[in-house]
Image (spheres, rainbow, N blue to C red):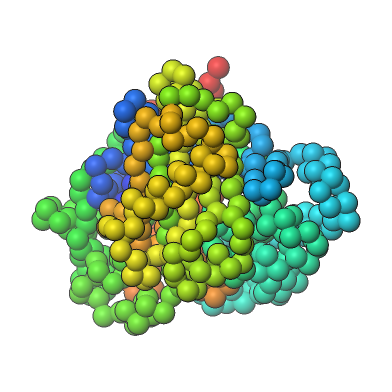
Amino acid sequence: MSTNHAVVVGAGLGGLAAAIRLRHMGWRVTVLEAGDQPGGRARVFERDGYSFDAGPTVVTAPYLFDELFESVGRDRRDYYDLVPVDPFYRVDFGDGETFDYVGDEDRIIAQIAKMSPGDVEGYRKLAAHAERIFSVGYEQLADTPFTRLSDMLRVLPDMLKLESYRSVYGLASKYLEDERLRQVFSFQPLLVGGNPFDTTSIYMLIHWLERKWGVHYALGGTTSIVRGMVRLLEELGVDVVLDAPVEEIDTRAGVVKGVRTEAGVYYAADMVVSNADPSMVYSRMLPRVKRRTRTDGHIRRMKQSMSLFVAYFGTDRTYEDIAHHTIVLGPRYKGLLHDIFNRKVLADDFSLYLHAPTRSDPSVAPPGHESFYVLSPVPNQQSGIDWEQMAPEYLDRILDHLDGRVLPGLRDSLTTSFSVDPRYFEHELRSHSGAAFGPQPVLQQSAWFRYHNVSEEVGGLFFVGAGTHPGAGMPGTLCSAKVLERVAPRPAVAQPIPGLPLRRAG
């Protein structure tokens, strides 16, 4: 007998967005989260008076959140506030030179003209190419399901015309001669788990996406988005259950019937939407299913993304000259990425992403203090690195580097510091091999080649989040929830949505 009940496994941004979409479709919904707070990678760490976003901090394509709230008669602005960030990123080359990556083309051109005058026209051509990729790769395909090979074959000619066989770095190099500019306009795949030298140039669309909608920050941190979405779900009558890790997705005759938590609690369900890592779901959570496609061998052959070492720290002084987002480039680019992604060794040098939210929002630190996190891409757990031994030493190396390069006096002003490493992604976030972003976004693992939004192994099982189409990053996870509305069935009897008509803030 139908219960008109959908269970969402995981309360990351993708799972929370999926739950909202499912309520819009009329399902009765329960969200089960393994951790002690919602958000998944977007959880928050509260420490010594500071608030640290654990994971994603860059908000792009904010309209996706707006339309999500509007779909159930709400106005996003009643739940949290966004502010623009300028520059989007400051790229620090280490030789005294910096480049402010911004949305305004005149400002970009002015900086290129100063740094490498011969690349001005090349950048214009690169931006035009990025816009063409965006019009196909994002506007037409980001929320389109790829459940059949014919779906892929249909778009293949356009992808070839757009030179998707090139890497992001390869496309940047086609138009730009200056190596520093090649790095400025190719590092973006690292934000979604990809090596710029391997990631398909489809991901050059990120450049145009950022230019089109800008880069934003949620006041209070990304956790304010999570809290706003959870509050909305509560208003919609959705239960978000914490400390409820799912052990098994129950199936009978190849169709989902419910889920069982590690505590033995059973939730009957007509459909299950997983925000968990598909590699983990297929290899560990479907014991009764004889898998034909997503076998253990298939999962082992997949290229998983790199992992991350993330340090969180506070200071009893402020750094007024630092940008909200800074990319601190090391002495090597291709060689370092080869070490991380291919050789899977921990290099002596590193490139870093420094997040300084206090620049936009003093509320995340005590008065007169500064809140930071710094992210270093590192090999995933296939490396065999002993992080129990390595983590304290690596944290010291990063803090010393920042002290000597971009945050003078850091060591003397530290008030708190701690870190997470690939063990956190593997065990707490339950990510295969401790990968921070799921499968790498190489061409052979994109669109139809990525984990499908509709399981081909189990009836009634669907996927959202970084591991499925279209991929990682906030726009990717939110678009995966949009795909869900195209591929999931409607309930036999729709459950009414409580609440007021659409309100407009202010």
Left or right side of 172 for 442: left
Where residue 290 appears, x then y in whole percent? Answer: 26, 80
Q: Quadrant of the C terminus?
A: top right
- Camera sees residue 201: no
Q: Quadrant of the N terminus?
A: bottom left
- Camera sees residue 407: yes
Q: How many marks?
A: 0
Residue situated furthest left in the rendering: 264
The answer to whether residue 275 is above or below residue 196 is above
Where residue 316 appears, x then y in whole percent? Answer: 43, 24
Write down the quadrant of residue 418 in the picture: top left
Left or right side of 145 for 11: left
158 or 283, which lies in front? Answer: 283
Residue drawn at (57%, 39%) of the image = 406
Left or right side of 418 for 144: right
Residue drawn at (54%, 34%) of the image = 408
Where residue 31 appears, x then y in whole percent? Answer: 29, 47
Residue drawn at (24%, 42%) of the image = 36
Residue drawn at (78%, 59%) of the image = 178
199 or 135, which lies in front? Answer: 199
The answer to whether residue 72 is above or below residue 10 is above
The answer to whether residue 379 is above or below residue 78 is below
506 or 433, which lies in front? Answer: 433
Where residue 3 appears, x then y in whole percent? Answer: 23, 52
The answer to whether residue 503 is above or below residue 69 is above
